[in-house]
Amino acid sequence: DVGGYLWARGVDTLLGCVVAVLVFRLIPPRATTLRIPEQLVRALRAVSDVTSHLARGVVTTQEARTARRELQLASFALTHAYEDSLAASRAQRVAAEQLWPAIAAVERLAYRTLSTCWALERLGGETAREAAASMFADDGATRIQKTLDEFIASIVNGTAVPPLQAMPHVLAAELMDLHEFMRKQA
């Protein structure tokens, strides 16, 4: 009986939809957008850790490689947090889209830091140390790490970022982009 079969399938489909809607309404939405600031902080801390190795031109030690791996993983986690927020509720999607400039700036900063490490690794030895010294002249690594700490404090505490001081050219564009976004958000 085709009519009976269609009726039974229709009822099954309707019940399945009702159950799905009830489950969707009863289970609280994941706060995926809250993960984005956590991942921004994680990535900025990882950049700071790698920068200390990068500034010395010593990027192939076990400690430096571990810091580089953590930076890469932090960048991936930031991307996943953003993608999860885009797949969440409309409000979380809008919040994630508003944070996109910061996410993009931090990802660019992470990959610029990693690519600079790879370049120094390719140079190797004393040449890498000399190149790093010229890139981070005039205590550039300390200024970068201070700026990263200010960014982290701004994200964690919801405070405004102080004016950006002169940055070493190697990471200046990415830091300026992030600073500009954070200044506008404050």
Image: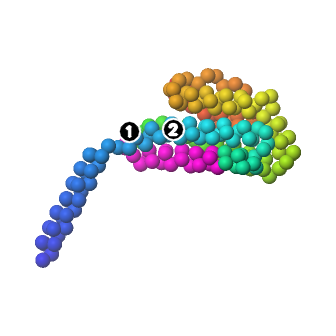
Residue in the picture at 71% in, 46% down? 64
Residues at marks 2 and 1, CA–CA distance in whole angstroms: 18 Å
Amino acid type, residue under disc 1 in the picture: Ala
Res 167 quadrant in image = top right
> Could you say which is closer to the camera, residue 140 or residue 49?
49
Is residue 184 visible to the viewer in this orientation of the structure?
no
Q: Is residue 85 left or right of residue 110?
A: left
Residue segment shown in magenta: 69-90
The residue at which mark 2 appears reads as 38
Question: What secondary structure is the stretch in magenta mostly built from?
Answer: helix
Is residue 107 visible to the viewer in this orientation of the structure?
yes
Q: Position of residue 52 (x, y in %)?
A: 72, 37
Whether residue 73 appears in magenta in the rendering, the answer is yes
Q: Position of residue 89 (x, y in %)?
A: 37, 43
Residue in the picture at 75% in, 31% down? 140
Of marks 2 and 1, which one's residue comes earlier in the chain?
2
Q: Is residue 173 left or right of residue 31?
A: right
The residue at which mark 1 appears reads as 91
Amino acid type, residue under disc 2 in the picture: Glu
Residue 118's tag is: none
Residue in the picture at 19% in, 64% down? 12
Whether residue 15 appears in magenta in the rendering, the answer is no
Q: Position of residue 47 (x, y in %)?
A: 65, 40
Q: Farthest residue to the front: give it.
A: 62
Q: Residues within 10 Å of mark 1 (few under 14, many from 20)?
A: few
Q: Residues within 10 Å of mark 2 (few under 14, many from 20)?
A: some
